[in-house]
């Protein structure tokens, strides 16, 4: 069911040179006093540009720190210790600091500005956060970004594994929308036509983008635009149904028992191929993009274990017991486990 109130970013900039304009963007949006949270090492990398931009624009930094934790108690404690006159919390960095900042924005009921430095997932545009609770990653409600500021030059400088993660997370919308349609047609859920259309348009636009390199400006901008649209689709739907299906349940299951899970987008990217292949749904498109981008080759270097993915496939239905995607049906789980052993790509990836 659609939410009564839909929060979408009022400030959205995805282009080259954004880092040097952060201050003016925030000032024009009416923010004079902010808290700035940065990922580890980012002060040395981008601090001069960011602090100079904020100072020039007359935006006061009430508090700033680097952080590399999403442990629930630590994030919550930090949030309630921030100055009372904080108008907005800025999260700049990778998934951890973005998740921490958006959760702080949620509990303090203040705007959250998302400044991702990698394209590893659609988390920079979503209203949920992945925090560590009882030793494992859990998804919790958080703040939809008031603003999203992405510098494509910064994204290019990030390790390529984050690009592969973003590619996997983006293509997972092929599987998630198919699951949602299946649930709606089976009477298990209600399809929100607008959210469904936006999620499909986002992934289709990205999947059809021509490129020579994953660091092409057009490719990066299309990836980031599409990831941002995915987060908005979830907000319209009032849930993660448009962008999280059976492939995410497999990833959540891996998170529940692995001591060191891979990047979220890598896990859901592999699970997307598995689900699309056993459903005979657009798997050739997924296969082609993974081949052209180097996603397959990167995954081959990770030393992944087939037994872990077999266990995750069996556990996947328990991750979202209220849903009825393809993975909730035993015949599809059995097909998926057979595919792990027989598919030519997967045989090279899993030990």
Image: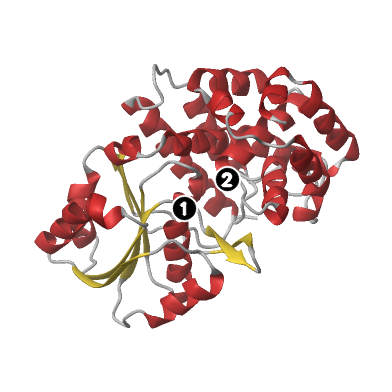
Eyeballing the image, is 172 above or below 79? above
Residue at 51 percent of width and 62 percent of height = 5
Query: Looking at the image, which is closer to me, 37 or 190?
Result: 37
Eyeballing the image, is 284 above or below 321? above
Query: Looking at the image, which is closer to me, 301 or 157?
Result: 301
Q: Left or right? Give the position of 184 relative to 295.
A: right
Q: Secondary structure at mark 1?
A: helix
Residue at 80 percent of width and 54 percent of height = 318
For marks 2 and 1, the one nearer the N-term is 1
Mark 2, other Cα within 10 Å: few <14 / some 14–19 / many ≥20: many
Among the 4 quarters of the image, the one containing residue 276: top right
Among the 4 quarters of the image, the one containing residue 197: top right
Please give the residue where the numbered disc 1 appears in the rendered image. Answer: 95
The quarter of the image holding the C terminus is top right
How far, Cα to Cα, is label 2 from label 1? 10 Å
Eyeballing the image, is 45 above or below 284? below
Mark 1, other Cα within 10 Å: few <14 / some 14–19 / many ≥20: many
Q: Left or right? Give the position of 224 relative to 64.
A: right
Q: Secondary structure at mark 2?
A: helix
x, y percent for residue 326: 80, 38
Query: Looking at the image, which is closer to me, 94 or 171?
Result: 94
Q: Left or right? Give the position of 47 relative to 343.
A: left
x, y percent for residue 74: 49, 74
x, y percent for residue 248: 67, 45
Asked if the residues shown at circle 2 and circle 1 are in contact, with their CB atoms under 8 angstroms apart, the answer is yes
């Amino acid at each position: 069911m659609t939410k009564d109130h839909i929060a979408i970013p009022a400030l959205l900039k995805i282009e080259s040179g954004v880092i040097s304009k952060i201050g003016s963007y925030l000032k024009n949006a009416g923010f004079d006093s902010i808290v700035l949270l940065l990922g580890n090492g980012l002060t040395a990398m981008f601090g001069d540009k960011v602090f100079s931009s904020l100072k020039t624009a007359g935006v006061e930094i009430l508090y700033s720190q680097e952080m590399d934790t999403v442990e629930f108690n630590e994030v919550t404690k930090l949030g309630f210790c921030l100055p009372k006159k904080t108008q907005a919390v800025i999260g700049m960095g990778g998934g951890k600091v973005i998740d921490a900042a958006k959760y702080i924005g949620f509990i303090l009921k203040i705007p959250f500005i998302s400044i991702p430095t990698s394209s590893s997932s659609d988390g920079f545009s979503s209203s949920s956060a992945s925090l560590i609770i009882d030793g494992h990653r859990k998804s919790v409600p958080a703040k939809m970004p008031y603003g999203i500021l992405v510098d494509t030059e910064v994204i290019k400088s990030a390790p390529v594994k984050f690009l592969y993660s973003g590619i996997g997370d983006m293509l997972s919308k092929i599987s998630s929308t198919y699951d949602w349609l299946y649930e709606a047609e089976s009477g298990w859920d209600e399809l929100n036509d607008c959210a469904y259309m936006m999620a499909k348009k986002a992934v289709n636009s990205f999947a059809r983008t021509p490129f020579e390199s994953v660091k092409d400006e057009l490719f990066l901008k299309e990836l980031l635009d599409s990831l941002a649209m995915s987060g908005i689709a979830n907000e319209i739907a009032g849930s993660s149904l448009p962008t999280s299906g059976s492939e995410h349940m497999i990833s959540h299951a891996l998170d529940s028992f692995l001591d060191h899970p891979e990047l979220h987008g890598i896990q859901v990217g592999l699970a997307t191929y598995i689900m699309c292949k056993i459903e005979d749904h657009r798997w050739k498109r997924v296969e082609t993009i993974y081949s052209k981008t180097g996603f397959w080759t990167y995954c081959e270097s990770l030393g992944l274990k087939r037994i872990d993915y077999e266990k995750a496939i069996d556990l996947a239905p328990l991750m979202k017991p209220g849903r009825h995607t393809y993975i909730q049906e035993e015949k599809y789980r059995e097909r998926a486990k057979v595919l792990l052993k027989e598919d030519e790509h997967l045989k090279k990836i899993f030990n």
